[in-house]
Amino acid sequence: MSSIIPSEIDVRAIRVRLGMTQQKFAVSFGFSVNTLRHWEQGRRVPEAPTRAYLLVIDREPKAVQKALRIA
């Protein structure tokens, strides 16, 4: 089975679906707020590994947060 990384991803839609502010989303998942704003405003596009990460965040946000949590 091959994986498909989307060529485009709607970062704002993911963030809104999770009910998070830009600040909360950035802090929760390890992004800078400025980078997040650039993506949402279309000034920059996430690279393929980041799009894959964002896809996982979209599908399994609690698992990502659990994995990133410091013990």
Image: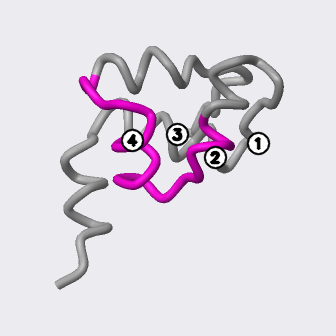
Is there CB contact under 8 Å for labels 2 and 3? Answer: no
Amino acid type of disc 3? Met
Amino acid type of disc 1? Glu
Left or right, residue 32 beside residue 14: right
Looking at the image, residue 6 lies above or below residue 62 = above
Say which element carries label 2.
helix
Q: Which residues are magenta?
A: 18-36
**Residue 38 on image: x %, y %:** 72, 31
The residue under label 4 is 25
Q: Which dot, 2 or 3, sits closer to the camera?
A: 2
- Residue 1's label in the rendered image is 3
Is there CB contact under 8 Å for labels 2 and 1? Answer: yes
The residue under label 2 is 50
Q: Which dot, 3 or 1, sits closer to the camera?
A: 1
Residue 70, located in which quarter of the rendered image? bottom left
Residue sitting at 68 percent across and 28 percent down?
A: 39
**Residue 21 on image: x %, y %:** 35, 31
Tell me which label, 4 or 3, sits earlier in the chain.
Answer: 3
Say which element carries label 4.
helix
The residue under label 1 is 47
Amino acid type of disc 4? Phe
Tell me which label, 2 or 3, sits earlier in the chain.
Answer: 3
Q: Main secondary structure of the magenta part?
A: helix
